[in-house]
Image: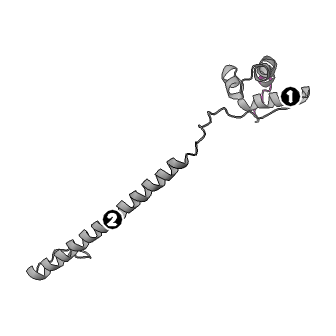
């Protein structure tokens, strides 16, 4: 047995809220979401109502753009950019020297372990593979 769909509630809402919703949108400039919070009508229904109203009255619908605060325009400071490039180059140079130093240190530790293993005949490095 099929359920009977009651369309009366749609027409009641339409009759009750249509004019109010259209006025809020076109005259007060409220958005669909804001209107749907104020009156119990879905956002998609509001969009359809406003579109229908606009077509009937010859109004062109424009998409509303989100009002985000635009970021401040970046000032192109040539001297600041030159200083940044110079400081970045100095940082790269410093890091390269530090890397060389650490590589030498690692090589020295490996050599020291090799000498200790050979002199004292004790395995210091962990052997690869499973324990036996």
Residue shown at the point (74%, 23%) measured from the top left: 29
Image height check: is 50 above or below 129? above
Name the quarter where the N terminus is drawn: top right
Secondary element at image label 1:
helix
Q: Which residues are magenta?
A: 3-9
In the rendering, at what x and y percent does residue 83 appear?
47, 51
Q: Nearer the viewer, residue 99 or 80?
A: 80
Magenta portion: prevailing SS class: loop
Q: Looking at the image, is 50 positioned above or below residue 111?
A: above
Residue 53 part of the magenta-drawn span: no
Q: Secondary structure at mark 2?
A: helix
Which residue is the site of mark 2? 97
Q: Within 10 Å of the Cα at label 1, are there few (<14), some (14-19), or many (20+) other Cα atoms?
A: some
Residue 17 seen by the camera? yes
Q: What residue is shown at x 28% (from left), y 67% (from top)?
A: 101
Residue 107 placement: quadrant:
bottom left
- Provide residue 40's location: percent of width, then percent of height: 69, 22
Q: Is residue 126 visible?
A: no
Q: Earlier in the sequence, mark 2 or mark 1?
A: 1
Say which of marks 2 and 1 sits in front. 2
**In front of the other: 67 or 61:** 67
The residue positioned 86% from the left and 32% from the top of the image is: 60
Question: For residue 51, which quarter of the picture?
Answer: top right
Residue that carries the numbered disc 1 in the rendered image = 54
């Amino acid at each position: 047995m099929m359920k009977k769909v009651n369309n009366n509630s749609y027409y009641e809402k339409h009759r009750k809220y249509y004019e109010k919703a259209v006025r809020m949108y076109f005259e007060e400039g409220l958005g669909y979401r804001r209107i749907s919070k104020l009156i119990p009508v879905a956002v998609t229904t509001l969009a359809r109502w406003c579109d229908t109203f606009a077509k009937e009255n010859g109004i062109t619908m424009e998409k509303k753009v989100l009002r985000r605060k635009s970021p401040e325009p970046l000032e192109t400071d040539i001297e600041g950019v030159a200083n940044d490039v110079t400081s970045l180059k100095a940082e790269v140079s410093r890091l390269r020297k530090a890397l060389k130093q650490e590589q030498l240190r690692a090589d020295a530790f490996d050599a020291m372990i090799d000498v200790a293993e050979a002199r004292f005949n004790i395995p210091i490095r962990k052997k690869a593979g499973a324990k036996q």
